[in-house]
Amino acid sequence: MPEQVAIIAGSGLSGMLEVSPSDAAAENAYGMPSSPLYDVTLAGNSVRVLARHGLPHTIPPHRINYRANIECLYSAGVDAVIALNTVGSVTTDVLPGGIAIPDQVIDYTWGREHTFVDSVGEGADHIDFTRPFSASLRASLLSAAAEAEIETGVGGVYAATQGPRLETAAEVDRLERDGADYVGMTGMPEAALAAERGIEYACIAIVVNRAAGRGDKPIHDELEAVSGAARDKAMAVVARFLGRVREG
Ligand code: HPA
């Protein structure tokens, strides 16, 4: 079991948390994290939370300082991260309003500061990223979901796109041909940076729309209609997961 769990909360989730700033937030060698590291009590369990887009939500996906965020968690002694990422569904295994625990990533982002291994002369540290998400965290999340009686997609490929615009229908067709099941804008380089810092990392994909060209409703209408329900499911899984960590 991890000792120090943190949540990286994404779109819409930060507002659901009652937060009080801790003194852990500070600029680090990689710049300013998106938010302070908040100490939050969630269903009786204390946990640290970083608001990926800032509080209030002001930072678009491609402008997030992922390195500063991961460094902030690392220097605070965090050894496990549950990342909450809203996504569109490319395949129809999990419909909008549902959640999934993906097990793979394809990175389509570009131009983001994506590594801590960045100085010429230090040599390269090629982390093994074969399995981008922690198997044990994923298993705990899936058990927590079962205990909370929340249906969850098991596995699947998270495609990280650059944003901030949503994709074209043809781009989503390509993602599907590539094997993607979910598409979001914030999963990378966050997962890789956590791996570089030796932090266990797993993602709860919160499905808020069908990806472009897949649904019959305008994407934003669907998103408005289902995102609350999907977020509630994710938070229930996180709460049970934290209970399991506390119980050891
Ligand atoms: N594409 C990319 N990112 C997203 C989507 C989407 O359809 N929905 C929520 N985040």
Image (tube, rainbow, N blue to C red):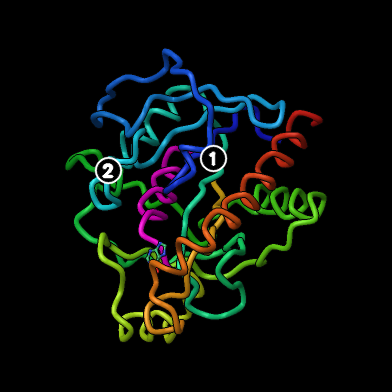
- In terms of image quadrants, where is residue 173? bottom left
- In terms of image quadrants, where is residue 81? top right
Q: Which residues are magenta?
A: 183-199
Name the outermost residue toward the top.
Answer: 23
At label 2, counting other C-alpha atoms closer than 10 Å, the crowd grade (few under 14, some 14-19, many 20 or more) is some
Disc 1 versus disc 2: nearer the observer:
2
Position of 212 relative to 193 (above/below): below
**Which residue type carries mark 1?**
Val
Residue 37 location (% of width, % of height): 44, 25
Residue found at x 23% / y 29%: 31
Disc 2 marks which residue? Answer: 59
Query: Is 49 left or right of 71, judged from the image as shown?
Result: right
Ligand 1 location (quadrant): bottom left
The foreground one among 3 and 165 is 165
Q: Is residue 194 magenta?
A: yes
The foreground one among 16 and 187 is 16
Asked if disc 1 is less than 8 Å from ligand 1, the answer is no
Residue found at x 70% / y 31%: 43
**What separation in Å lies between label 1 and label 2 (alpha carbons)?**
20 Å
Question: Which quadrant of the figure contains the N terminus?
Answer: top right
Q: Is residue 20 magenta?
A: no
- In terms of image quadrants, where is residue 184? bottom left
The answer to whether mark 1 and mark 2 are in CB contact below 8 A is no
Query: Is 79 left or right of 161, judged from the image as shown?
Result: right
Residue 132 location (% of width, % of height): 51, 57
- Per the image, label 1 sits on a secondary structure element best described as strand
**Which residue type carries mark 2?**
Ile
- Per the image, label 2 sits on a secondary structure element best described as loop
At label 1, counting other C-alpha atoms closer than 10 Å, the crowd grade (few under 14, some 14-19, many 20 or more) is many
Residue found at x 65% / y 67%: 153
Residue 57 location (% of width, % of height): 34, 40
Disc 1 marks which residue? Answer: 81
